[in-house]
Each structure stands twice: as structure tokens, then as C-alpha cells.
Amino acid sequence: MSYEIKTPELGTVGLLRWLWRQLTSMRTALILLLLLGVASIPGSIIPQRNQDPTRVQQYFVNNPTLAKVFDKFSLFNLYSSTWFSAIYLLLFISLIGCVLPRTWEHFKNIRALPPQTPKNLIRLEEFRTFESRKSAAEILVIARAHFGKRRYRIRDCDASVAVEKGFIRESGNLLFHLSLIGILIGVSTGSLGGMRGSAIVNEGESFTNVATSYDSLSAGRFFKLSDFPPITLKVIKFTATYDLLTNAPLDYSLILDVTESGKSNSRRVEVKVNKPITFGSTRIYLQANGFSPKVTVRDNTGKIVLSGAIPFLPQDGNLTSIGAIKVPDLTPTQLGIVGSFLPTAERDKIRGGFSSYPEALNPRLLMAAWLGDLGLDSGVPQSVYRINTKKMDRVGLQSLAPGEVWEIPGNSNNSNNVGSITFDGVTQWVNLQIVRDPGKPFSLLGAVFALLGLLISLFARRRRIWIRTVVGENTSNSRVIVEIAGLSRSPGLAQEIDALVNVLKEKWGDDE
Amino acid sequence: MMSKADWATLSNNFVYSSMGIIFIAFISFAFQTAWSFRVVPQDLDTPNPKSVKYTKAGRIGIALTILGFIFLLSGVIARGVSAGRVPWGNMYEFSITGALAFLFAYLVTLRKYNVQWLGLVVTLAVLLTLGTAVTLLYVPTAPLVPALKSTWLVIHVCAAIISGGVFLLANCVAAAYLIMDRYQDEDGNEHRPNWAKQLPTLAELDQLSYRLVALVFPLWTFSVIAGAIWAEAAWGRYWGWDPKETWAFITWVAYAAYLHARVTAGWKGKRAAWLCLFAGSTFLFNYVYVNIWGAGRHTYSGL
Ligand code: HEM
């Protein structure tokens, strides 16, 4: 136990007060800011669940032990983890505790005058002295006028004048820090009251914003579906254009028909990659696109058991896509088709079948048919693009061009055909991302004012200058001795004082 | 009428010529430095064969640097014409524009400060950047991918590239400070070797790197804000901790710490110079690592 520190007498209140003072010091705020920077590094190296869930899964497969340790420290969801949030919440508490009292202090000082002229000007920066023929009063009048024109604050002292400039520097500094708090308000409003969802929609189909239509939906604690009025979006046409030489995409354009709640007629809009459509604080983005092969599956009696366009997931720049066609309603066993779709199919010895261009110029659907249990009732969520073939047997492979039919063979128990699949053609799908962020305007205003505050606090110059007149005892002709000096943290003080000296000397004809 | 391919070839010729010119500038600066081993500042005032050679080499270096700048500028413009857009679509283009911004920052600083001696470092850095660009990063001109088709490309990338150029210059100055610092004894007296006598004093170097950083820090802030506004329009969120965003934030924090350390904590000299170098390296890391090996959405770099 230490005897010097009187902790017991400090008591809880005292301790809390001490902690608060520590927390709200500039130093702590800076350390927390640095800590936040350092803490954000792992997230740029370790894959993040919200950005790239498949890479996270891959990590678990490749480095199971390390992945478990990472997961324990929330390193796969670093930016929403408790410890990361703790740092920035502390930072903002610290910031508020530091900035609000300073702002109040600054506000009270709005009319404050510069401090009295110090006794000893020689010790200050840029000390100048010279003798003048004019009277002390005249000198002070001209100095006051000179600085008045330059918008200094002026205080008349005994036989001297004190002037000050650069109050706005602290104003800018405070504005900057207060704006950071504005950004925090924006971010938290957005994450508590906002939502983010996405839905894959085929050409010709519609999306309505009820909870069941989203493929994924995450919402803040205070978001209610009623915050986003009903709306129906019909995908009319999606057009992708590509560069003929490099196959790189040039332009994506999505035409939608929008029907808002309570209106019977729809309006037509175009969505592009950098041009979402906006409804209040909700925006709808064109996020991704791909092909949906259209298929019809019939059982061995010829009855249609499945028909429609099935979104496939693109794997490369030429939109080679993979997908799964799941047919649970076939008797006696379920059917699963693992498919690859090639928009412009070509063949060579090394790669086998591949796609050579991202448009559907020569579409081909390659399929492997599996019979058995699709495992849909197991309760484990499944990807719509993949089939769990653990309890299934592969019965055949086939490649179809549009219009072609494949009679799917049976398995060893039953060698009759189980049915057929027709490749009817192809359409496209788009992934719509629906985002509501009510905090955006606060963040934007915060950012703009932070920048403004930063500019002011970096470039406004703060300085104090004092001018004193001394009626010399040992000077002839009762000349007046003028003393000038200043204080400044910014450059330019010398020039400012030289300018004053010139004015005083010129106007009054004092040469030396 | 010149075709797109003609413009692209023209651009390449300009870029290669500027490399040639800057290489000769580099040689001149190297000669100047070599001669400076034998010239002391007093010699400069009295014309003698040594000091004349010394001054001439420096002048030639600067003149060639300016010429190289003009050629590089033409190269960048021709590249833009050949692609029919701003020349900021892939890493080759970012690199040549970045080198241009860096040269520009140097030439502007040269008007106000005595930084001719930095020419050796600057031309070397430009040669390295351009050399990497034309050998490893070169891609033929191609149109922009849809994600980059936006006015924000012009605003955000332009601000980022200029900030990068000035940060790099500030790093050169800070590095020079650290080298010169080794010739200072405990009492603050400098005992520089001859070749270093022409260089500004430690205090001047210290001030200069601070000024450069303070000058572009707001521009860098603006570039990040513009990126966020663009991200909101392109990806549906203004901040998502994508690797490039994360490193932009880290760079921002590092430079903010540098400015605070100087202004509030009164750091100067060595410690400040090291901090400046550190902050600059986070920027470089963002450019090199995140573009090439990083995942995330800033993956238009065309590699
Ligand atoms: C919050 C959002 C964003 C941040 C913080 C951000 C950050 C940065 C940074 C730090 C750079 C500087 C150069 C470097 O060191 O690599 C940069 C460059 C660039 N950014 Fe962003 N960015 C954002 C959004 C965007 C968006 C939405 C796009 C386009 C879709 C974009 C496209 C580019 C391009 C083309 C460059 C120049 C090349 C490069 O250096 O990679 N940025 N961005």
C-alpha cells in the first residue's frame, strides 16, 4: 500500500472525479484515437463476415485452430465487436467530456480582451524598440488604428496597447471536434434506425418490400418495417454491355417499374451502378447480376413438377455460373441437378467446356443429375446454389442447348427414366440492395463541418502583440521610446511587427 | 485524325521520354552532389571553376526536371485522350499520375524553399515509380468499369493522388532531417560534411515537413469524405471498413497524431520526423498492399 496517495480519503466520488478527469484529457483522447487506428488493422487482413462470408468459412477449413482463436476475439466481426465498440465509445465520451466544457469556456470568452501588457517585453518574441518624436498618445492612436483595420481585438492599458488575433482558431478546433460527435450521431442513428436487405429478382418478376421477399435482411433495433412504405418494383429489363476486346463490363442498366403504396399507376425508372433510386431515406441499388437458366422439369408421366428461371451464381468475368435445381416433389426419390451455365460456350482440350464471353451468345447448360435425399428437411440451412449430395447417387451427365430435353435416367433400384428436364432458355437476374439509413444527413453535415473546422484551426493565425510607450528620461528632446513585442504559435509574427514599425516610422517621420 | 491506339502510343512515348529526361536530371543532381564534397558554401560566393560546375549541374538538373514534368504531363493527358476519360482507371494510370503530382509538389515547393538538393531523391523516386509502372503495372488503355463511371472518380482520386504526392515529398524532407540530424552534437551545433552544407538547417527541414503535411491534411480529409460520399452512391454505405477504407482511416489517424503531437504536445525534430515517416508509410502500404494483395472492393486496379 502506498502512503503518499491518499486514496482512502478520496472516496468513491473523488475517485470517479479523478477517473473522469483522466478520461477527458486531451492525451487520453489522442491515445484512444491511436488505439482505434491500431485496432482496425486486423480487420483489413483477416476476412470479415459481413464483407466476405465465404472467405471466413474457408479460413475455418484451412486453419481451424487459429480460426477458433480469432473467433473468440471477434476478429471475424471486428468492427461490430464489443471491444472495438468499447474503444470508440470511450473515445467519444472522452471527446465530449473534453470539448463541451471547452466550448462553454470559449463561448464565455467571446468578448474577452487580450491580457495586460507584461512588464518585460524584452523577454517576448520579436522585440523591437526605437525612439519617436511624436507623443505617446499619438503613437498609441496610430497603433490602435493600424490593428483595428486588421481586425485585432484591442485593449488599452496604461501607456500601452495590447492587441490579439486568432480567436477563431480555437473556434475552428472546437467546431472540428464537435462535428466528429455529429458523425457519431449519424452513424448510430443509421445503425439503430436503419436496415439493409437484398433480393435477387429475375427479369419480368417483381419485388415487394415485405419481410419475406428479402433474401437477406438485417435491421437496426429501432427499425420498423412500417418505416418503409410498401412499394413494388418490377424488373422490366436488365442490359449489360461489354468491351469486345477485353470482355470487361462497360455499362449496366436496369429498367424498373415502380408502384408506390396507395398509387395505382407505376412509373418507369432506370437504375445504374452509381445511380440508385431514392425514396426518402431509403435507396435501392443495383448490386450484382447474373443469368437464370429457364427450365421445366416433368415427372415420368409428363406432369410438370417445376418450371421457372433459376438464378445461377457467376464465377468469373465471362459469367460461367454455377447453380442447383432442386426438385423435392418427384416420386419415388427427390431429384437434384448440379448445374453449370456457360453463356458463350466453347470447348478446348485443357479447360473442357468454358465460357468465352459474358453475354448469352451460345448458351449451354451442363448438368449432373442426382437422385436421393436432398436433405431439405434436416433443418440445416442450405445454399440455393449448391446441393448436399451426401445421401444421393449421381445418375447422369448432360449438356443442353436451349430447347433441348434430357430424359433423366433412373438409378440402380429402378432403371426407368425418372422424368425429363427441358432447357427453355435463359433470362437475367439482378440483385437489388435496399438500404435505409436515416443517419446519413448527420454524418454528411458532420463531415463537412469537420473539414471546415480543420481548415480554420490549421490556417487561422493566432498572435498577441503589445506596444508600450516610455517617456524617456535620458533622451534628448523628450523623445518617446516605443517598445513592441509579441507572442505567436504561427509564423508571420515578425512581418506583422515590421509592418507596424514601418507605419509608425513612416507616418511620423521618425527615421531613427 | 489520330486513333485511340495512336494516342496510347503517343502517351507511352511521352512517358518513356520523360523517364529518359528525368534520368539525365538525376545524373546531373548526382554530379552536383559529388562535386559538393569539394565545394564549401563560401566558395559559392566567389566564382571559381569548382563552384561554377557545381551550380551549373544543379541548374541543369532543375531545368531537366521541369522538362521531364512537361513530358510526363503530356503523357498523362494523352493517356486520358486515348481512353476517352480521366486517366485514373488502373494502377498504371494511378502511378504515372502520382509521379506527376509528386514532381509538381516538388517544383512548387522549389519556388518558395531552398530544396534544390532534394532533386536527387525526388528524381530517383520518380524513376522508381515510373519504372515499376511501365514494367509491372502496364495495361493497355481500356474503358472504365461501370463502378468507376462517376464524377466522384475525378474528385476523390484527384484529391487522393495529390495528397499522396505531397505526403511523399514530406517524407523525403523528414528523411533528410533524420540524416542531417546525425551531424548535430549534443549542444545543437551542426558539423556537416561538405556535401551537406548547402542543405537547409535542421530547423528549416523540420518546419518544411510540417508545413507540407499541414497543407495537404485537409485535402486528404476531403478525399476520404469524397470517397465516402461515392461509396454511399455506389455500394449503399458510406463506410464499411473495406481494407482500403480501413487504411485510409489509419493514415488519417497517423497524420492527425502527427499534427497533434507537434501543435499540442510540442514534438519537434527527430520524434516528429519519425512519426511523419510512419504516417507516410501507412499511405504507401495502402497503395501497394491493398491494391495488389488486399481483398475488398477497391479491386478495379486491373492487376
Ligand atoms: C469511404 C469510402 C472510401 C475511402 C475511405 C476510400 C479511400 C481511398 C484512398 C485512401 C485512396 C488513396 C490511394 C491509396 O492509397 O491507395 C483511394 C483511392 C481510390 N479510390 Fe477510394 N475510397 C473510398 C471509396 C471509393 C469508391 C466508392 C470508389 C469507386 C468505386 C473508389 C475508388 C478509388 C480509386 C479509383 C482510387 C485511386 C486509385 C488507388 O489508389 O487505388 N474509392 N481511395
Image (spheres, coloured by chain):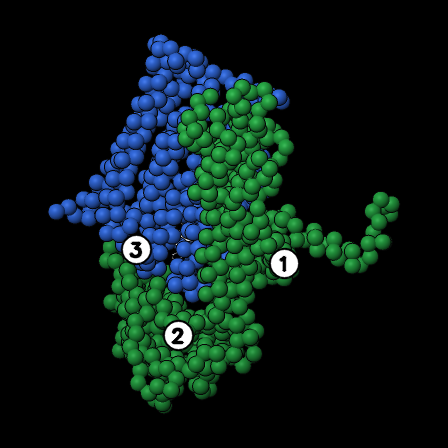
Residue type at mark 3: give it: Leu
Mark 3 and mark 1, same subunit?
no
Q: Earlier in the sequence, mark 2 or mark 1?
A: 1
Residue that numbered label 2 is attached to: A279
Instruction: Tell me the number on the disc at residue A301.
Output: none
Q: Nearer the viewer, mark 3 or mark 1?
A: 1
Residue sitting at x 35%, y 59%: B147
Name of the residue lying farthest toward the left: B1
Q: Is residue B105 above or below residue A18?
A: above
Quarter-wise, where is residue A499 in the image? Answer: top left
| Residue plotted at (35% across, 10% down) | B47
Q: Kindly identify which numbered label has been placed on residue A93.
A: 1
Q: Which mark is residue B144?
A: 3
Q: CA distance from mark 2 to mark 1?
A: 34 Å
Where residue B103 sits: x, y (%)? Answer: 35, 35
Disc 2 to disc 3, C-alpha distance: 29 Å
Judge left or right: residue A187 versus residue A370: right
In this view, the mark in front (2 or 3) = 2
Kind of element beneath mark 1: helix
The chain to which mark 1 is attached is A
Give x and y (percent) for residue A377.
54, 81
In this rendering, do the residues under marks 2 and 3 share a single chain? Answer: no
Q: Position of residue A361 (x, y in %)?
A: 24, 67
Chain assigned blue? B
Q: Amino acid at mark 1?
A: Ile
- The answer to whether the residues at label 3 and label 1 have Cβ atoms under 8 Å apart is no
For mark 3, give the secondary structure: loop
Q: Residues within 10 Å of mark 3 (few under 14, many from 20)?
A: many
Q: Residue furthest front?
A: A477
Q: Which chain is green?
A: A
- Secondary structure of the residue carrying tag 2 is strand
